[in-house]
Image (cartoon, helix red, strand yellow):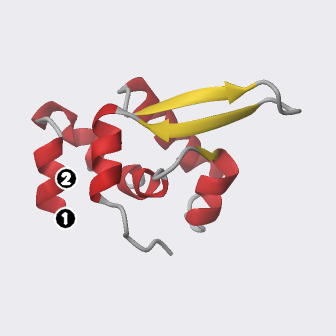
Amino acid sequence: MAHKILDVSEEKEQDLIRRSWTLPVLATLQKPSQFSEIKRNLSTITDRALSQSLRRMEDRQWIHRRVENTARPPMPIYHSINTGAMISNVTSGVILD
């Protein structure tokens, strides 16, 4: 699996892959998810670590954050895109604890 992940990412992007929560977060984004859903799937991640990880991936355009304004309060939904989506597909089926 590691070889496949490296194959779908460019060398200049691999520093983000080495960050501790990048791959686990992408593994949870098989479908668009709310912050709380991602956190529930990664029981040991802190709010701060998840927030920072999502922000880094959003800056690199690996995930997209869309705010659902019809919900009260407005709710951000995250989904993987571009390289993030390719890595998410590679990690599909991985069981997270």
Quadrant of image for the N terminus: bottom left
Residue 4 located left or right of residue 60: left
- Determine whether 76 is above or below 6 in the image: above
Residue 9 located left or right of residue 94: left
Cα separation, mark 2 vs mark 1, equals 6 Å
Residue 12 position, x and y percent, is: 15, 31
Residue 42 position, x and y percent, is: 55, 64
Residue 90 position, x and y percent, is: 27, 56
Residue 46 position, x and y percent, is: 61, 56
Amino acid type of the residue that numbered disc 1 sits on in the rendered structure:
Met
Q: Are marks 2 and 1 in contact (CB under 8 Å)?
A: yes
Residue 55 located left or right of residue 17: right
Residue 1 located left or right of residue 47: left
**Res. 23 visible in picture:** yes
Q: Which mark is residue 1?
A: 1
Kindly identify the residue that appears in the image at 38 percent across and 49 percent down: 22
Kindly identify the residue that appears in the image at 64 percent across and 50 percent down: 47
**Res. 19 visible in picture:** no
Q: Residue furthest right?
A: 72
Nearer to the camera, 5 or 16? 5
User: Dot 1: within a 10 Å radius of its alpha carbon, few (fewer than 14), some, or many (20 or more) residues?
Assistant: few
Amino acid type of the residue that numbered disc 2 sits on in the rendered structure:
Ile
What residue did someone put label 2 on? 5
Nearer to the camera, 35 or 92? 92
